[in-house]
Amino acid sequence: MPTGPQGQKRPASETAAAVQVAKIATGQEQESPPSARKSVVLHFGQDRPRPHEGEGRMDDAEYVIVQAAAIPWDFQETEDGQWVARSEVLGALLQSATFPDLVEDIQQTMAAIFADLDETGDLEQFIEERGWTVTRLRPKSGRVNMPVRFLIRTEPHDTAHPLSR
Amino acid sequence: MTRRTRFLAELRAAGYVFKKQTDRTDLYRKTGQTVTLSVPRTAHLSDTFIRAFFKREGRSEADAEAFLQDS
């Protein structure tokens, strides 16, 4: 079974990973080890690292760890069978065709939002305004064009509420 | 003009610019702010999604319904 940078167990498939994210986001499941940690890690993977000369180690990436309080998403199924989700904390709104797609799209959207904020130099201010913290871990190898991976730790929170509330 | 094309025109008129692409959506961010919108690349945009956008922009329900009526 694949593991994360701190030895956490990771699902082998993208779909399983998406389901795990949903469970973690709704507090139904915690990253291992489950002990005294108040927060859980949501790993928003970007594209898998491409093998380079036979290697594809995730520790070749720069990791940006965002310690957040909670990032709840309100969602609902629409009259025409689509799924719409909104995060007031992030100021984000999105639509997906199915619920599994919604889970994946939320995952990818959050990674894209943080990556864009980082590129425009707005990430630190965005984090500070929300009372979160950000830590950057750079790999020892110092390779150029390394991917940036965002690890977002949040407090477990209640299941997302319908958008109409 | 399709609903999606018209919606993207509304988006740009409101100051949103394209930022990134994910597997199924295009991420737009409002210039000078951090609010974002992920627009699916499929042709169909639901009424709920469009109404939520108009509401977030502080525009009236009548504006949203007028947009939906013309679609």
Image (cartoon, coloured by chain):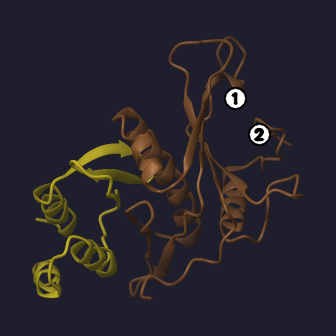
Chain colours: A brown, B yellow
**Residue A95 badge:** none
Going by the numbered disc 1, the residue's amino acid type is Met
A80 lies above or below B53: below
- The mark nearer the N terminus, 1 or 2, is 2
Q: Chain of mark 1?
A: A
Residue occupied by mark 1: A58
Residue occupied by mark 2: A4
Going by the numbered disc 2, the residue's amino acid type is Gly
User: Residue A25: x and y, percent?
Assistant: 65, 65
B52 lies above or below A107: below
A101 lies above or below A60: below
A145 lies above or below A90: above
Rendered image quadrant of residue A117? top left
Q: Secondary structure at mark 1?
A: helix
User: Residue A47: x and y, percent?
Assistant: 56, 37
User: Residue A125: x and y, percent?
Assistant: 40, 44
- State which quarter of the image contains the N terminus of chain A: top right
> In the visual, does A63 lie left or right of A156?
left
Look at 54% across and 82% down and name the residue there.
Answer: A161
- State which quarter of the image contains the C terminus of chain A: bottom left
User: Residue A122: x and y, percent?
Assistant: 36, 40
Judging depth in this view, the residue of B2 and A142 nearest the camera is A142
